[in-house]
Amino acid sequence: MSGGGLILRLIDLVFILLFGFIVISQINTSKMINPPKSTEASAHKDSTAVIIVGVLPNGVYPINDGQTVLPDSTRLQRYLDQEAKKAMAAGLPLGVRIRANWDAPVRYSLAAAQICKDLGLPKGLDVVRTQQK
């Protein structure tokens, strides 16, 4: 039995060495391929106007980190309508980012989202934990 045990250990050692050589060997079959490059300039710039609308727990909408503060959703609708017209005149697409405070009632966020939907503006909705100023 002692001779058979030695053979098994040697076979295990050979397999370990074999798998070790397989693992560390590098097989490099990659070919150098040069992807095609555009010869034409981009027809449009990748700039987009984005308005950040905050939603506070008391229903106030600060715009772009508090530069403008709108007290209710009707003024928010007027403001976004004016900004959409300005962006359209400038030829820029306009997007709206709605950032609701974590303890703001969802009805204020949904009102802002509905306004964006009515105006045909793409929107994104985030919920953040911030301190009210």
Image (spheres, helix red, strand yellow):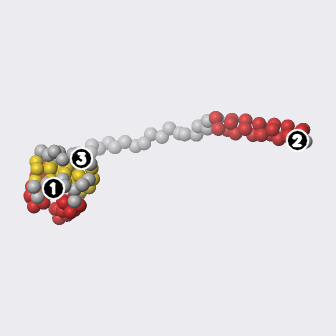
Residue 76: x percent and y percent? 12, 57
Q: Identify which residue, 57 or 17, lies in the foreground.
A: 57
* Residue type at the position of mark 3: Thr
Among numbered discs 2 and 3, the one appearing first in the sequence: 2
Quarter that holds the C terminus? top left
Q: Is residue 8 left or right of residue 31?
A: right
Residue under numbered circle 1: 58
Between residues 65 and 117, which one lies in front from this camera angle?
A: 65
Percent of width and height locating residue 27: 61, 38
- For residue 4, the mark is 2
Could you tell me which residue is drawn at 64 percent across and 38 percent down? 23
Q: Is residue 103 visible?
A: yes
Instruction: Name the kind of residue labelled 1 in the image.
Output: Asn
Rounded to the nearest angstrom, the CA distance separating label 2 from label 1 is: 82 Å
Are the residues at dot 2 and dot 3 in contact (C-beta closer than 8 Å)?
no
**SS at circle 3:** loop
Q: Residue at x 18, y 53 (%)?
A: 56
